[in-house]
Image (cartoon, grey):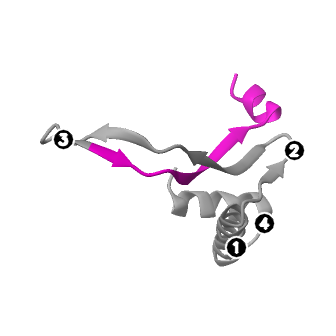
Amino acid sequence: MNKTQLVEKIAEKAGITKKKADEALKAFESVVTETLGSDDNITLVGFGTFEATERKSREGRNPKTGEVVKIEARKVPRFRPGKALKDALK
C-alpha cells in the first residue's frame, strides 16, 4: 500500500474527504518526526511504540574497494508493534 492508497483508506474509514485524510496523515508524520527528534517516544497502546534508538559506531567495508571505513554512531527511528497488532497478524 502506498501513501495515496493509505489516504484513500483513511478517508473511507473515517468518513472524511481525501484532503482532510491527507492533512491528518501529514500532521501525524510531522508529530512523529518532531517527537523522535526530541528524544521522546510515542506509545499507542495496543498498536505499538515509535522510538529513536542509538546505533553504535562500527567498522564497515566499501564493497567496491574492500577498504575499511568507519561508520559513525547515529540515531535511527524504530517501531515496535504492540500485542494487539501482533495478534491481528497471526
Q: Earlier in the sequence, mark 4 or mark 1?
A: 4
Q: Are marks 4 and 2 in contact (CB under 8 Å)?
A: no
Q: Are marks 3 and 2 in contact (CB under 8 Å)?
A: no
The crowd level at tag 1 (other Cα within 10 Å; few <14, some 14-19, many 20+) is few
Q: Quadrant of residue 13?
A: bottom right
Q: Quadrant of residue 45?
A: top right
Which structural element holds mark 4? loop
Which structural element holds mark 1? helix
At which x and y percent is residue 41? Answer: 77, 54
Q: Which residue is mark 2?
A: 45
Q: Which residue is mark 4?
A: 15
Q: What distance separates the C-alpha of mark 3 from that of mark 1?
A: 43 Å
Q: What distance separates the C-alpha of mark 1 from that of mark 2?
A: 20 Å
Kindly report which numbered mark, 4 or 3, lies closer to the viewer in this rendering.
Answer: 3
Which structural element holds mark 3? loop
At which x and y percent is residue 53? Answer: 63, 47
Q: Earlier in the sequence, mark 3 or mark 1?
A: 1
What residue type is disc 2 on? Val
At which x and y percent is residue 89? Answer: 69, 28
Q: Which residue is more in the foreground, 35 or 39?
A: 39
Q: What distance separates the C-alpha of mark 4 from that of mark 2?
A: 24 Å
Which structural element holds mark 2? loop
Q: Which residue is mark 1?
A: 27
Q: Which residue is mark 3?
A: 67
Residues drawn in magenta? 69-90
